[in-house]
Amino acid sequence: MTHNNRGKRRANPLPETVRAARLAAGLTLEQAGKVLHTSGRVFGQWETSADNVSARRMHPGLWELFLIKTGLINRPEFDPDYD
């Protein structure tokens, strides 16, 4: 059930988009992990291809926070309103 005050459900970003954003921000996996208070290993899992059984998808809220904190929020290729 969708709550009345919630907007459109956002999809998880694709692993290749997460990697592209990290590289655009000029960050290593460890540095990117620190932006979201996690490890580089976890951030690397978000960049892992969806074909991999152990792949994890980044939560849309964390994705938007990463874009805000790295200054990439207004770049169209990383638009948080993707489908």
Image (spheres, rainbow, N blue to C red):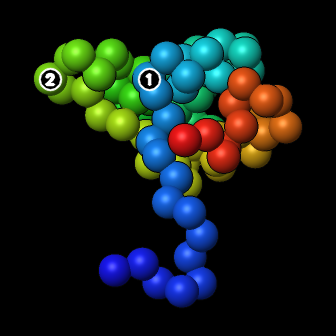
Q: Quadrant of the C terminus?
A: top right
Contact between marks 1 and 2 (CB within 8 A): the answer is: no
Residue in the foreground of this view, choosing between 46 and 1: 1
The residue labelled by disc 2 is: 53
Quarter-wise, where is residue 5 in the image? bottom right
Image x and y of residue 30, in percent: 52, 23
Image x and y of residue 57, in percent: 36, 37
46 is higher (above) or lower (below) than 20: below
Secondary structure beneath label 1: helix
Residue 30 in view (yes/no): no
Q: Amino acid at mark 2?
A: Val
Quarter-wise, where is residue 28 in the image? top right
23 is higher (above) or lower (below) than 69: above
Q: Quadrant of the N terminus?
A: bottom left
Seen in the image, is 82 located left or right of residue 57? Answer: right
Residue in the foreground of this view, choosing between 2 and 80: 2
| Residue drawn at (82%, 30%) of the image | 75
Secondary structure beneath label 2: loop
The residue labelled by disc 1 is: 15
Image x and y of residue 39, in percent: 42, 33
